[in-house]
Image: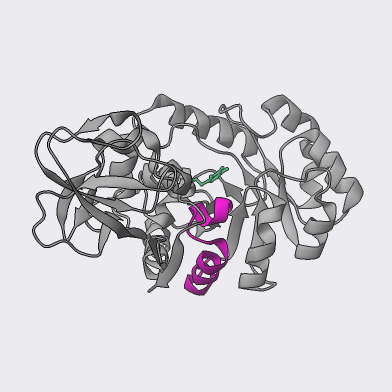
Amino acid sequence: MGTGTLSIDLAAIAANWSALDRFSTAETGAVVKADAYGTGIGRAARRLAQTGARKFFVAVAEEAADIRQAIGPDPEIYILSGHMSGDTDMIADLHLIPLLSSIDQMLRHFEALPGTPFGIQLDTGMNRLGMEAGEWEAVKSLVLPQNPMLIMSHLACADDPSHPMNAQQLAAFIEMTDGIDAPRSLAATGGILLGPEYHFDVTRPGIGLYGGLPFADATPVVSLSLPIIQTRDVLAGESVGYGNTWIAERDSRIVTVSCGYADGILRVMGPKTHFFANGTAVPVAGRISMDSICIDVTDVSDLPSALELLGPQQSIETLAQNAGTIGYEILTSLGARYSRRYVG
Ligand SMILES: *Cc1c(COP(=O)(O)O)cnc(C)c1O
């Protein structure tokens, strides 16, 4: 079998949820959009539900089918993109709660599914999704008697505790929702770490559950092991890979593993990235291809049958740094071709 093995530690996801839950007095939800950040939405959601999560968040209604199946009828599933045209049947059949982000969505929901649960999404300065203060003011008296399940907004800069935007958005959220008798939610992972004034009634952690920053104390969740499919010796002066970008400076031993940029190992990370052979760091040799990567193992005396890319020696954050991106993008890019193994 040539495919790599992506191990997903469900006990670590549960431990991260519990740790974030202990941080706040609010109810802790769980964001499971994008296939639970690449970890597998059904398995992750079921474990989170067993651990105590009762409010789940997905980006789009289509993502909810698998988790409804996994967690049963009771937990709430919120849709961050609200009620889009074409969503009505799914919302009704799966008992979803759209977080309405515009007056159009509000009218659509009230007309198509009157009397069914919904939440409201407010914009407090990010300018991405949600009703602005003026719109909200205009419809508030219509919305509140319908008992919204949740009134939420999202922070733009919560990964930087010193950013003045955090306090600005907090003040705007309080101003837009003060005195309202509905549960409120402002904080994702970063917001939880900013402190209790950001927690309100419900928090919405995502990345922290899956082991990523800004939750620095998170337990790592994924590890990735790639079997070696070929070993060869190259002579000093010979080249390896596309474009001949790597030239052996000495007689070298090169192995090839079958994974590449089609599996989320981004081409751009090549020059800075190491794999691990029984704990020894070994550098990528040449360009990352679509399905294979060559690695210089000349300095390894006892070559294992597989190399590690993610695990105790190297986190998603290191790969993110190597690629000039964030752990979120590394996780959600890990492709469908790995064989997935659930542990814990
Ligand atoms: C993705 C998302 C979250 C989760 O954010 P993390 O930074 O991954 O914790 C919460 N709320 C909204 C609106 C989101 O889009």
Does the magenta stretch mainly form a helix, a strand or a loop?
A: helix
Looking at the image, is 285 positioned above or below residue 181? above
Q: Where in the figure is residue 228, as x and y percent of width and height?
A: 29, 59
Residue lying at 68% horizontally and 27% vertically, measured from the top left: 133
Image quarter where the N terminus lies is bottom left
Name the one closer to the observer, 54 or 285. Answer: 285
Q: Residue at x 16, y 61 (%)?
A: 303
Please state the horizontal and vertical placement of residue 169, each as a whole percent of the image: 52, 31
In the rendered structure, the answer to whether residue 155 lies left or right of residue 330 reads right
Q: How far across and how far down the image is residue 159, in percent? A: 39, 37
Q: Is residue 222 visible?
A: yes
The picture places residue 316, in percent across and down from the top left corner, at: 34, 48
Q: Is residue 261 magenta?
A: no
In the rendered view, does 197 fall on the left or right side of 276?
right
Q: Is residue 33 magenta?
A: yes
- Work out whether 338 lies above or below 122: below
Q: Which residues are magenta?
A: 31-53
